[in-house]
Image (spheres, grey):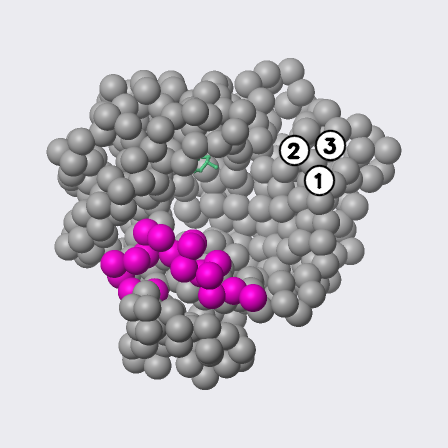
């Protein structure tokens, strides 16, 4: 557990093409990028006092999407400059920027580097072109490799995103992905089991969860064998390269999310901006932000949330913590059922049940 700090998330709601599985908010129409950027500027101004108040505790920023690298060179400079004025990105413990292979150029990387971006996350998803095509990605593995070479000239702290458990993906395909990816020695790897979401092309796709669970263990053993530390359900990193920004989410640190669809958590309130770029622009033209939802957490929500976040991290839940005491009886039931165990003063979900951790955690909550 780190000391929670304050962080900023910026949602860039544009993509070249919508991937078949993706439910994140983004548009493929770039006619509103200028208005979007002006609105981000206005939203920052609305939060000026808050950002000034949090300045000393503000340690990480994450530009995510959508596809942040979709923006042109001028747009990227404009966006980074807005945040640089609040606190120089060079002074951040971590300043992250998501890249998609199709929209990376050397000039863009130079801009990111000059502003102080110090970690990049690339969506490769697979090293198999047939699978990439099935997922609806616009890049081939070769395209990715070409860009990876350039990216690593500028950034050493690189994270790669992969998806597994895709219909038609064999164990051999998965091992090939793992072999290909680890041969590049990225500092961090996020691996997500394919999920199907409403209103996506894959809405009715059948997923084999048993296969996904088997693959999860293969992945874990493979990556741990290559020296990666499994530090969160879906995240692996070399020593010293855990994602600080994401750890702050999992440690319930406060964060302000800017842009349509961005979420925030401040003073025990959670809210989400509307997932609608036009509503976002219209609202800010009228000096306000339109929200999708807003809630103030009560004591029960807070405890449930703490339990969930602590158990998602491999470190586990401290036996001396308030949360452990509150949930002690329910945790003991899970230990009796064989789903959890106590190791070195911490309670953890047993490795064999990590793939179904969501279910175990929700059964333990109030
Ligand atoms: C917010 S997305 C955006 C990242 C970036 N635009 C890209 O395409 O790589 C972050 C990651 O979530 C994962 N992801 C998104 N939708 C998913 C789904 N339905 N199932 C599994 N993983 C998913 C992908 O690995 C993706 O890289
Ligand atoms: S996965 Fe990334 S590129 Fe694909 S639609 Fe989602 S945000 Fe856009």
Q: How many marks?
A: 3
Residue found at x 20% / y 56%: 224
Give the magenta range: 349-366
- Residue under label 2: 275
Q: CA distance from mark 1 to mark 2?
A: 7 Å
Q: Position of residue 358 (x, y in %)?
A: 43, 54
Residue 205: quadrant of the picture: top left
Q: Is residue 29 magenta?
A: no
Q: Say left or right for 240 vs 98.
A: left
Task: Tell me the chief SS of the magenta region.
Answer: helix
Q: CA distance from mark 3 to mark 2?
A: 8 Å
Mark 3: few, some, or many residues within 10 Å (few <14, many ≥20)?
Answer: many
Q: Position of residue 223 (x, y in %)?
A: 21, 50
- Residue under label 3: 280
Please tell me which residue lies in front, 80 or 268: 268
- Residue under label 1: 292
Residue found at x 15% / y 55%: 225
Nearest to the eye among marks 3 and 2: give it: 2
Mark 1: few, some, or many residues within 10 Å (few <14, many ≥20)?
Answer: some
Q: CA distance from mark 3 to mark 1?
A: 11 Å
Q: Are marks 1 and 2 in contact (CB under 8 Å)?
A: yes
The numbered disc on residue 170 is none
Q: Secondary structure at mark 1?
A: strand
Residue 44: quadrant of the picture: top right
Mark 1 and mark 2 lie on one chain; the one further toward the N terminus is 2
Is 185 situated above or below 3? Answer: above
Q: Secondary structure at mark 3?
A: helix
Q: Secondary structure at mark 2?
A: loop
């Amino acid at each position: 557990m780190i000391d929670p700090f304050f962080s900023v998330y910026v949602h860039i709601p544009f993509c070249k093409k919508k991937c078949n599985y993706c439910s994140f908010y983004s548009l493929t129409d770039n006619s509103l990028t200028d208005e979007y950027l002006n609105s981000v500027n206005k939203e920052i101004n609305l939060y000026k006092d808050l950002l000034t108040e949090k300045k000393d505790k503000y340690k990480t920023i994450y530009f995510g999407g959508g596809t942040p690298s979709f923006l042109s060179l001028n747009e990227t400079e404009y966006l980074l400059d807005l945040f640089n004025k609040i606190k120089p990105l060079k002074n951040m413990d971590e300043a992250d920027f998501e890249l998609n292979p199709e929209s990376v150029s050397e000039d863009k990387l130079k801009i990111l580097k000059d502003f102080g971006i110090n970690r990049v996350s690339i969506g490769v998803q697979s090293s198999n072109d047939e699978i990439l095509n099935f997922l609806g990605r616009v890049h081939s593995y070769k395209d990715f490799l070409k860009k990876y070479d350039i990216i690593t000239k500028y950034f050493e702290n690189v994270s790669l995103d992969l998806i597994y458990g895709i219909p038609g993906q064999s164990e051999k395909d998965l091992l090939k992905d793992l072999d290909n990816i680890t041969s590049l020695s990225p500092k961090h790897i996020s691996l997500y089991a394919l999920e199907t979401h409403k209103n996506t092309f894959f809405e009715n796709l059948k997923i084999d969860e048993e296969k996904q669970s088997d693959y999860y263990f293969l992945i874990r053993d493979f990556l741990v064998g290559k020296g990666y530390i499994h530090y969160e359900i879906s995240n692996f990193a070399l020593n010293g390269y855990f994602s600080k920004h994401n750890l702050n989410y999992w440690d319930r640190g406060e964060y302000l999310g800017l842009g349509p669809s961005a979420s925030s958590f401040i003073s025990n309130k959670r809210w989400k901006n509307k997932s609608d770029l036009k509503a976002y622009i219209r609202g800010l033209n009228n000096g306000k932000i339109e929200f999708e939802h807003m809630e103030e957490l009560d004591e029960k929500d807070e405890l449930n949330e703490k339990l969930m976040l602590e158990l998602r991290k491999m470190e586990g839940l401290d036996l001396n913590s308030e949360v452990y005491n509150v949930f002690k009886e329910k945790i003991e039931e899970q230990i009796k059922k064989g789903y959890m165990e106590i190791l070195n003063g911490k309670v953890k979900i047993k490795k064999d049940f990590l793939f179904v951790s969501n279910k175990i955690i929700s059964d333990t909550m109030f």
